């Protein structure tokens, strides 16, 4: 019950922010901006978002192959889509990751910790790609990042990711917490198994480097998609500005104060893009088109979740 209360509060918070934008910039003006959209360009951006899902699935496919698990790409795609739906609409924001882990246990005969380690590593590699793209943004436009006060948020994000990687993958930290795990009984044993499975994932350095390169390509596609949405509204902002701001917007969207970054994403667009000359109404409109597309793909994942049966069609 508490989880659903938190979910409802986050959802209402995000919706309230969006309504605030419509009120602040006059809803007729906002509707006018959105109704002037060029549909072919929006469709092109939607295709880019669908390509992102395919590339994310391929990255996960490589990690699974590295640990000796073969699964049909179609089934992997179904699990990624369903996981995206659950991460967006189920309280906690980790339901999709748990679903993918459980699905690997059922369909690929992997242990729970083994499947979860692959999912976690996939997420970590994705976050590393986002951090590297944000670093590139810093190099492109330090002045604008400084004006928005984002440099400390970037440092905090890097520190949080490094801390998480140490907690998950450091063998030294693992040794120092042995006594604590023994006190947890079976749970401690599960954590022990998870650690060694995570260590097994990072042994495949060539695969990890390939996955990191894929993550950077995914971040580029995310930038391209947002740029196309802006073009569909006739917002003349250089592509480099999107290279600068979009990674930071995705980092800010991870803050656990709304559902799927709803409202927070729009606020970030309004904060950042006027710094490079984009009208605030067009910034909000671009963000709403992006948010709508992300929700649409998540709902597609919901259909997959409802109608897909997990079966044993793999070989390990």
Image (cartoon, grey):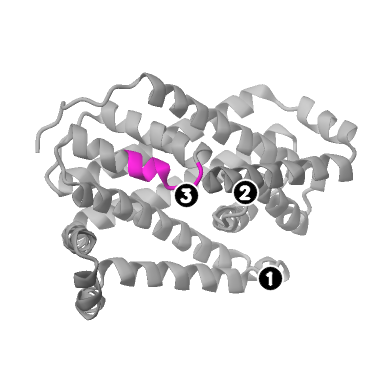
Residue 134: x percent and y percent? 52, 61
Q: Distance between the residues labelled 3 and 1?
A: 22 Å
Is 82 left, or right, of 64 in this rendering? right
Q: Residue placed farthest to the left in the image?
A: 316
Q: Nearer the viewer, mark 2 or mark 1?
A: 2
Residue 36 in view (yes/no)? no
Find out whether residue 46 is within the magenta segment: no
At mark 3, the secondary structure is helix
Q: Which badge, 3 or 1, is on the more N-terminal residue?
A: 1
- Disc on res. 219: 3
Determine whether 124 is above or below 58 in the image.
below
Which quadrant is home to the C terminus? top left
Determine whether label 2 and label 3 are within 8 Å by CB: no
Q: Is disc 1 surrounded by few (<14), some (14 to 19) or many (20+) residues within 10 Å?
A: few
At mark 1, the secondary structure is loop
Q: Which badge, 2 or 1, is on the more N-terminal residue?
A: 1
- Disc on res. 258: 2
- Disc on res. 27: none
Determine whether label 2 and label 1 are within 8 Å by CB: no
The segment highlighted magenta reads 91-99
Residue 270: x percent and y percent? 75, 52
Q: Distance between the residues labelled 2 and 3?
A: 22 Å
Residue 76 placement: quadrant: top left
Q: Which of marks 3 and 1 is in front?
A: 1
Q: Which residue is drawn at 43% across and 46% down?
A: 218
Q: Residue at x 61, y 72 (%)?
A: 151
- Disc on res. 149: 1
Residue 139: x percent and y percent? 55, 68
Question: Which residue is more in the foreground, 182 or 20?
Answer: 182
């Amino acid at each position: 019950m508490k989880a659903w209360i938190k979910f409802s509060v986050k959802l209402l918070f995000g919706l309230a922010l969006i309504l605030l934008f419509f009120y602040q910039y006059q809803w007729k003006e906002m509707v006018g901006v959105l109704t002037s959209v060029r549909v072919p360009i929006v469709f092109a951006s939607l295709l880019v978002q669908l390509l992102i899902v395919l590339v994310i699935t391929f990255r996960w496919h490589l990690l699974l192959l590295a640990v000796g698990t073969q699964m049909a790409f179609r089934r992997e795609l179904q699990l990624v889509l369903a996981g995206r739906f659950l991460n967006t609409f189920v309280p906690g924001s980790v339901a999709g990751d748990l679903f993918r882990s459980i699905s690997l246990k059922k369909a690929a005969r992997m242990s729970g910790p083994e499947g979860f380690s692959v999912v976690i590593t996939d997420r970590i590699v994705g976050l590393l790609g986002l951090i590297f793209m944000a670093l590139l943004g810093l190099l492109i436009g330090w002045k604008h990042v400084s004006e928005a006060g984002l440099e400390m948020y970037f440092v905090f994000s890097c520190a949080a990711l490094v801390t998480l990687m140490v907690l998950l993958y450091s063998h030294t930290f693992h040794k120092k917490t042995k006594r604590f795990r023994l006190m947890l009984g079976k749970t401690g044993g599960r954590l022990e198994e998870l650690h060694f499975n995570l260590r097994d994932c990072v042994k495949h350095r060539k695969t990890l480097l390939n996955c990191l390169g894929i993550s950077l390509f995914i971040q580029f596609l995310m930038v391209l998609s947002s740029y196309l949405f802006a073009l569909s509204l006739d917002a003349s902002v250089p592509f480099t500005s999107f290279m600068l701001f979009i990674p930071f917007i995705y980092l800010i969207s991870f803050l656990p104060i709304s559902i799927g970054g709803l409202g927070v994403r729009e606020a970030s667009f309004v904060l950042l893009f006027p710094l490079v000359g984009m009208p605030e109404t067009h910034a909000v409109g671009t963000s709403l088109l992006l948010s709508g597309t992300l929700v649409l793909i998540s709902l597609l994942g919901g259909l997959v979740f409802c109608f897909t049966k997990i079966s044993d069609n793999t070989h390990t």
